[in-house]
Image: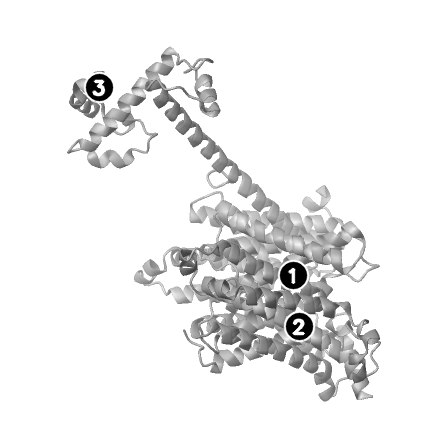
Amino acid sequence: MMGYEFVALSLPPIVIGVLAAMACALPGNFLLLRRQSLIGDAISHVVLPGIVVAFLLTGTVAALPMMVGAAAAAVVAVVAIEAIRRLGRVESGAAMGVIFTAMFAGGVLLLEQSDTSSVHLDVEHALYGNLESLIWLDAVGWQSLIDPAALALLPPELWRMALAFAVVCLATWLFWRPLKATSFDEGFAQSLGWPTGLIGMGIVIMAALAAVAAFDAVGSIIVIAMFICPPAAARLMTNRLGTQVAWSLAFAVLSAVLGYVLAGYGPLWLGYSASVSAAGMIATISGLILALAALFGPHRRA
Amino acid sequence: MLDALTFQLGYNAALVTLGATMLGFAAGAVGAFLYLRKRALVSDAISHATLPGLVLAFIGMVALGGDGRALGGLLLGSAGSALVGLWVTNWLTRTTRLSEDAAIGAVLSVFFGFGIVLLTVVQNMSAGRQAGLEGFLLGSTAGMLRSDAILIAVGSLVVLLATLYMRRPLLITAFDPGYAAVRGINTHRFDMALMVLVLGITVVGLKVVGLILIVAMLIIPPVAARFWSENAVKVVGLSALFGGLSGYIGAAASATAPALPTGPIIVLTSFALFVLSLLLAPGRGLLAMALRHRRLQKQVHIRQGLLALARNQAIYEGFTRRLLRRAGMMQADGVPTLEGRKEASQLLHDEALWQELRRSQTLSELAIRDDGLTRIAEVLTADQIAALDAQLGPKAVS
C-alpha cells in the first residue's frame, strides 16, 4: 500500500521538481559565469504580468496561452532592460530593478482588478507554485509505470518540463564550445569571429524557456533558487566547466528530492500532521548546499 | 480621488497617506546614495531576507502569549533576519569567488524560500489563520492601525535624518572610494552604514509596499532623478521628491477603492515618473538627445553642401538640398544664391585657415578644436586670423 501512495502522490511531484531544477540549473551555469545571474530573477518576476494578460485575453487558464504570455513578457522585459541600459545610460542592475518591479506591480494590479475568483490564478500561485497538487490519481502502484493507459494520465506538467529540459540539454550540447568560450573570455570568442552578442542572447532565451516552463509547475522561488544556488555551489567545487555543470545538476537533483521529502515527511517525523511548502523547502536545501560549498568547497577562493 | 489627495477621507486614511509619503521621501533619498554607489540590487536581497524573521517574530510572539500581529515586533524580527541576509551576502562576496550578483540572488531566493516554509508552518497553527502575514508580501494598508501609520512615518523620518546627517561621507564614498580613503573616511564603515539605512527603510516599508516591491521605492526614483541633473545633491533631492510623490499618490489612490493595492500603485506611479524623465528630461532625456542629434545632422549636411557649392559641384542628396534651400543659400534649380556663394567661400577660407593653423609653430596645438563644425573665429582672435591670412598668401586668391 505504501508503494501505491508513493507512486501516485509523491513520485510525479518529485520527478517534476527534479526536471525543473535541472532545466534551470543548466543555463544558470552560464548566467553565473557571465555575471548575469539576476536575469533569472528578473524573468521569473515578469512572468506574472505575462500570464495575467494571457488570461485576460483568452479567458482560460490553459497551459499554452499562459506559456506564450509568459514568454512574451520575458522578451518584453529583456528588450526593455537593454533599451533603458543603452538609451538612458543606466547601470544594468538598476535598469533590471526598474523593469521587473514595474512589470510585477502591473501584473499584481491587473490581477486584483480582474475577476479571477473563478479560476486558480493568484500571486501566491505564481510565487510558490503548487508542486504538491501535481498528483497521478490513476496510478495503482509501481506497475503503473509500464502501463501506457495510466502513463497517458500523468500530470501534463511532467511532459512539458521533460520537453523543456530536453531542449535546454540539446542546446547546451550543440553550442558547447561557443558557450564555453564566450562565458570565460568574450574578447577571445570575438576574435575567433563568433557572434558573441547572439550567443549571449541565446543563453538568456534558454534561461527564459526554462523559467517559463518551470514557473507553472513549481513557482518562481524554485526557478530563482535553481538558476543560482546549484551553479554557484558547483563553481566552488571545480575549475572545469564540464565538471561544474555536472556538479550543478547533481546539486539540483539533490535539492529537489531532499527538499520535497523533507517538506512532505519532515513535519511528520517531528510529530506534526501537516506538511510545509515544498517549493520553499527545495530552495532552502539548495541554499544549505551552497553554504556547505562556500565553507568547504575545494575551489571556494579565486 | 480629489478627496483622498486632499486628506479628506478621514483621519486614518490621512495618516496612512502621510506615512506613505514620508516613506517614499526617505526611500528616494536613501536609494539615491545606493544608486550612486552602483549597488541598487543589494536592496533586493535585503528585502527578501526579511521574510523568515517576520514569520519567526510572529511565531515567537504567539508562543509568548501575544496576538502576534504587533507591527513593532514583526518589524524587529524582519530587521534581524535582513541583517543576517546582508551579512551572508557580504560574506559570500568577500570569502568566495562568487560575484556580488550571484550572492544577492542566492540570498534572496533561499531566505525567501525558507520564509515561505515558515509561513506554511504558521498557516497550520491555530492562531495563524487570521495572521494576514501574506499582506507583507505585497503590502496592504487596509485595516492599518493608527499607531502603525505613525510608526511608519516616524521610522521613515529617522532614516531620512540619518541619511542627511551622513550625506557628505556617503557621497564621497560613492564617487571616489580611493579619495575617501585618503581623506581618512572609513569607506567600509560608511558602506555598512548605507546598507543599514537601506535595511531600515525596507523594514519600515514592508507593511505599505510589501517585501517583493519595496526595492522599487529604492531603485526607480533615483534612476528617474538621475536624468534631470549631473549634480549629486540635486539628484538626491529630486529622488526624494519623486519618491514622496509616488508614496502620496499611491496611498491616496488606493484609499479610494478596495481593489487598488497600495504597493503596486506606488511602484507604477514612480515608474510613470521614470518614463516621463526618460523621455522629457533636458540633457539626458531621449527627446533632448534626438533633437541634439538632429541639429548636428543639419549642421554637417549644410557644411558638406556648402563645400560642394564652393567647388562648383552639383548636390544630389535630397536632405542637403532641402536644408540649403530653406536657408536661402540655393535656388530650386541647384544654383547657389548670392548668400550661398558668400557662405561657401567663407567656409572654404576657414578650411584654408585651419590648414595653415596646423602648420603654424605657435598655434598648431589649437588644431584639436577643429571638429569640422567650429568656425575659426570662435577659436582665434582677429589678430591671429589676420596673421594666418597673411601667410596664406596668393594661393588663397586663385
Q: What residue sits right under mark 2 in the picture?
A: A19
Furthest residue toward top: B338
Quadrant in the rendering for residue B105: bottom right
Marks 3 and 2 sit apart, C-alpha to C-alpha, by 80 Å
Residue placed most toward the observer, B12 or B233: B233
- In this view of the protein, can residue A243 be seen by the observer? yes
Marks 1 and 3 sit apart, C-alpha to C-alpha, by 75 Å
At label 1, the amino acid type is Gly
Q: What element carries label 2?
A: helix
Quadrant that contains the C terminus of chain B:
top left
Query: Which chain's residue wears label 1?
Result: B
Label 2 crowd (10 A; few <14 / some 14-19 / many >=20): many
Residue placed most toward the observer, B329 or B102: B329
Q: Residue at point 50% right, 76% down?
A: A243
At label 3, the amino acid type is Ala
How far across and how far down the image is residue B391, in percent?
16, 23
- In this view of the protein, can residue B74 be seen by the observer? no
Q: What residue sits right under mark 3 in the picture?
A: B396
How many numbered circles does the render carry?
3
Whether labels 3 and 2 share one chain: no
Q: Residue at point 56% right, 72% down?
A: A229
Marks 1, 2: nearer the viewer: 2
How far across and how far down the image is residue B374, in percent?
32, 29
Query: Which chain's residue wears label 2?
Result: A
Q: What residue sits right under mark 1 in the picture?
A: B210
Colour setting: one colour
